[in-house]
Image (cartoon, grey):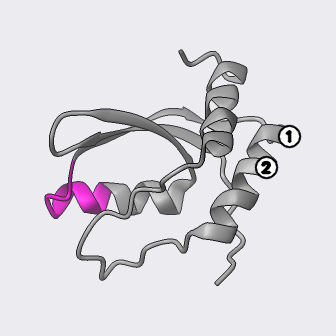
Amino acid sequence: MAQDETLDLIEEITRQDGSKYREIGNMVQNGRAELAVERGFLKEVRILQLNIPHSQNVTKYEQYINEHYVMQDESMNHWDEWKRTPAADQMVKDILNENHIG
């Protein structure tokens, strides 16, 4: 099921084991991550940058996410981490670099 999410922020997500990853998301996805923290599925989530420029890399990553994932609803019973292909992982790295987040 394709969706039409616009991604416009960068966040850092801490898994229960303490490992962290950075994700390109939006306020709805961030709200779901915050809910996942409250329910004990994640340890922490924090926004690193809001309103990131809508670059070609962001557009490509949005297409990848919209084709492969559906935004979790409030009834979630686990955290659905967006797994990336090597190409999608490179897009995220490029987005982080474009936004000076190392």
Vertically, is 6 above or below 73?
above
Identified at 14% across, 58% down, the residue is 40
Identified at 62% across, 28% down, the residue is 93
Residue 101 image offset from top left, x and y in percent: 56, 19
Q: Nearer the viewer, residue 89 or 78?
A: 89
In the image: residue 23, left or right of residue 60: left
Q: Amino acid at mark 1?
A: Gln
Identified at 70% across, 49% down, the residue is 61
Residue position marked by numbered label 1 in the rendering: 56
Q: Can I make out residue 10 in this image?
A: yes
Residue 94 image offset from top left, x and y in percent: 70, 27
Q: Amino acid at mark 2?
A: Lys
Residue position marked by numbered label 2 in the rendering: 60
Pointer 2 and pointer 1: residues touching (CB < 8 Å)? yes
Q: Which residues are magenta?
A: 34-42
Between the C-alphas of marks 2 and 1, the distance is 6 Å
Crowd band around label 1 with a 10 angstrom C-alpha radius: few (<14), some (14–19), many (20+): few
Q: Can I make out residue 51 in this image?
A: no
Identified at 75% across, 43% down, the residue is 58
Q: Nearer the viewer, residue 43 or 86?
A: 86
